[in-house]
Image: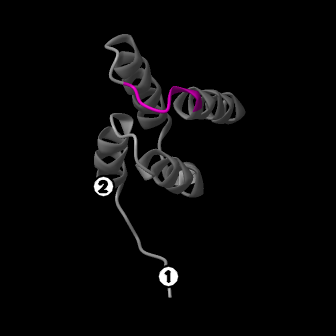
């Protein structure tokens, strides 16, 4: 049985950094977790996620690029909704 756990923004960010370079199920799981917690993540951190995704892409290390770029769109929409 799956339990709801409380995680900190730092833990989510560490999971995110791991998942960026992973070609496993990690990207989907991390993206879903970030979406579930999106309202608890500050705008400055959302911008950091976007920056990290683009940096990883530019370095050629980004795996599952389509999923990450879709997530960037999601993050940008979230930022716009907060303005």
Quarter of the image with the C terminus is: top right
Instruction: Give coordinates of residue 43: x percent, y percent.
Output: 50, 35
Numbered label tally: 2
Identify the residue under disc 1.
2
The answer to whether the residue labelled 1 contacts the one labelled 2, judged by CB atoms less than 8 Å apart, is no
Instruction: Give coordinates of residue 3: x percent, y percent.
Output: 47, 82
Q: Residues within 10 Å of mark 2 (few under 14, many from 20)?
A: few
Image position of 35 with respect to 17: above or below: below
Residue drawn 35% across the image and 21% down it: 56
Horizontal relation, residue 82 to residue 4: left or right: right
Residue closest to the eye, 4 or 23: 23
Q: Please, what secondary structure does the residue beneath circle 1 have?
A: loop
Residue drawn 58% across the image and 28% down it: 66
Does 63 appear in magenta? yes
**Which mark is drawn over residue 11?**
2
Alpha carbon of mark 1 to alpha carbon of mark 2: how far? 18 Å
Horizontal relation, residue 55 to residue 1: left or right: left
Residue range corresponding to the magenta coloring: 62-66
Does 12 appear in magenta? no
**Which mark is drawn over residue 36?**
none
Residue drawn 42% across the image and 30% down it: 63
Instruction: Give coordinates of residue 42: x percent, y percent.
Output: 47, 42
Where is residue 5, by image quadrant? bottom left
Closer mark to the observer between disc 1 and disc 2: 1
Horizontal relation, residue 10 to residue 68: left or right: left
Residue closest to the eye, 64 or 30: 64
Q: Please, what secondary structure does the residue beneath circle 2 have?
A: helix
């Amino acid at each position: 049985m799956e339990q709801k756990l409380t995680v900190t923004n730092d833990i989510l960010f560490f999971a995110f950094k791991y998942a960026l370079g992973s070609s496993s199920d990690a990207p989907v799981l991390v993206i879903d977790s970030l979406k579930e917690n999106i309202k608890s993540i500050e705008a400055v951190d959302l911008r950091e996620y976007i920056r990290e995704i683009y940096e990883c892409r530019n370095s050629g290390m980004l795996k599952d690029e389509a999923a990450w770029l879709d997530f960037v769109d999601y993050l940008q929409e979230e930022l716009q909704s907060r303005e």
